[in-house]
Amino acid sequence: GAGVSQSPSNKVTEKGKDVELRCDPISGHTALYWYRQRLGQGLEFLIYFQGNSAPDKSGLPSDRFSAERTGESVSTLTIQRTQQEDSAVYLCASRPDRGRTEAFFGQGTRLTVV
Amino acid sequence: GENVEQHPSTLSVQEGDSAVIKCTYSDSASNYFPWYKQELGKRPQLIIDIRSNVGEKKDQRIAVTLNKTAKHFSLHITETQPEDSAVYFCAASKPSGSRLTFGEGTQLTVNP
């Protein structure tokens, strides 16, 4: 595709349910990032992938959060036993390679936990 | 790890005035400093970036300066227009594979 694609664009889930968010990076981009953005707040780093390995997952807020990536392609962020404080926009970004290059963002998944 | 601080958190200017947003970073190994603009409800988009081998970069009404010694960089917008109103984020990154660390953002409002 032409850009980073995320699905679903909106997700409403009940407290305690598991959710899975998907990110399709730009083809050929080796680096992939997940960020969380609460309403009116900044970009909170969650995890970084280089290829299918995650050298930095220090931003994952709890063991309810996990992520994986297939090769240099799709990534999924899974939140288990969702809580109301998980409500936020989850943004994915990809970069062509490590280092000093532009990161392109997807449109985000707006997660609402009720 | 890297820590990026951004000031001010809100900035209101009159149309035609200049706006300046400042960021500091903690890791002297960082060498890539992008600025993103995020309009309400939209994704962040790169507006300008600078690498540590230069001290200033300009693109039309937007410029960024970098002071490696002091570990700070700034975004300058001249002749502001209402469509410049948005949240602006600075960020820093090291050369080897690592996170892109963002500042907390600045809400810029340009009043007509």
Image: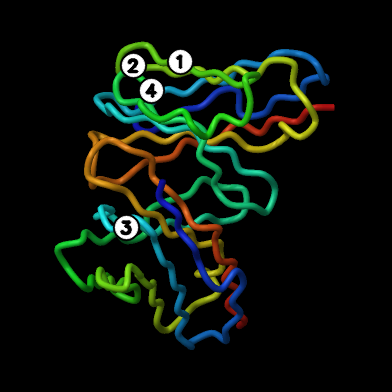
Image quadrant of residue B68? bottom left
Chain letter, disc 1 residue: A
**Which sits earlier in the primary sequence, circle 1 or circle 4?**
4
Task: Give the left or right position of residue A15, taking residue B45 as reference.
Answer: right
Instruction: Identify the residue position indicated by label 4 in the image.
Output: A54
Q: Are marks 3 and 4 in contact (CB under 8 Å)?
A: no
Image quadrant of residue A86? top right
Please tell me if label 2 and label 1 are on a single chain.
Answer: yes
In front: label 3 or label 4: 4
- For the image shown, how many numbered marks are present on the structure? 4
Amino acid marked by disc 4: Ala
Q: Secondary structure at mark 1?
A: strand
Residue A52's label in the rendered image is 2
Residue at image location 53% in from the left, 36% down from the top: A91
Residue A68's label in the rendered image is 1
Q: Are marks 2 and 1 in contact (CB under 8 Å)?
A: yes
Q: Secondary structure at mark 2?
A: loop
Instruction: Identify the residue position indicated by label 3 in the image.
Output: B33
Could you tell me how far apart the alpha carbons at marks 2 and 1 are, in whole angstroms? 7 Å
Chain letter, disc 4 residue: A
Task: Give the left or right position of residue B3, taking residue B42 as reference.
Answer: left
Q: How is the image coloured?
A: rainbow
